[in-house]
Amino acid sequence: MDDFYGSDFLTIVDEEGTEYELEVLGTFEYNGAVYYAVIPADHDEDVLVHLEISILKSVEEDGESILCVVDDEQELQAVNDLMMDALYSDEDTEE
């Protein structure tokens, strides 16, 4: 996993044209695909513990890389497990 708790930001636009700015906590690969762990960029630092992390998958569409929600529950669980393992292994190495 690359740079967990980084300070990269990205803006995505939904199907209705609404823009969302997200903070990228980390990127990682699973089964040849790239996934992003993100939170809203405008989060309150005091409630960071209670934020829900979203996982988005990078896919190619018409020659363009786009981010989409992971619909498959098994895939989402596997990616979430990888993310949590990476997060906690980083904490273990800091001690």
Image (cartoon, rainbow, N blue to C red):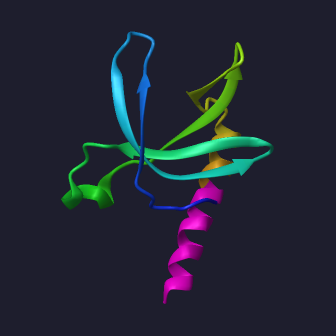
Q: Position of residue 90 (x, y in %)?
A: 55, 74
> Is 66 inside the magenta-drawn segment?
no
Residue drawn where x is 30% and y is 55% of the image: 50
At 38% from the left edge and 39% from the top edge, which residue is drawn?
22
Outermost residue to the bottom: 95
Q: Is residue 84 magenta?
A: yes
Position in image of residue 29 (x %, y %): 71, 49
Q: Is residue 71 above or below residue 44?
A: above
Q: Quadrant of the N terminus?
A: bottom right
- Between 36 and 82, which is closer to the camera in this rendering? 36
Q: Compared to 10, does 4 lie above or below?
A: below
Q: Residue at x 60, y 59 (%)?
A: 2
Pinpoint residue 20: horizontal percent, then vertical percent.
Answer: 35, 29
* Residue 58 relative to residue 38: left or right: right
Return the residue nearer the eye: 85 or 6: 6
**Highlighted range, magenta:** 81-95
Q: Residue at x 56, y 62 (%)?
A: 84
Question: Is the stretch drawn in magenta largely helix, strand or loop?
Answer: helix
Picture coordinates of residue 66 (x, y %)?
59, 25
Task: Name the residue at the right extreme.
Answer: 31
Left/right of residue 44 with respect to residue 6 in the rendered view: left
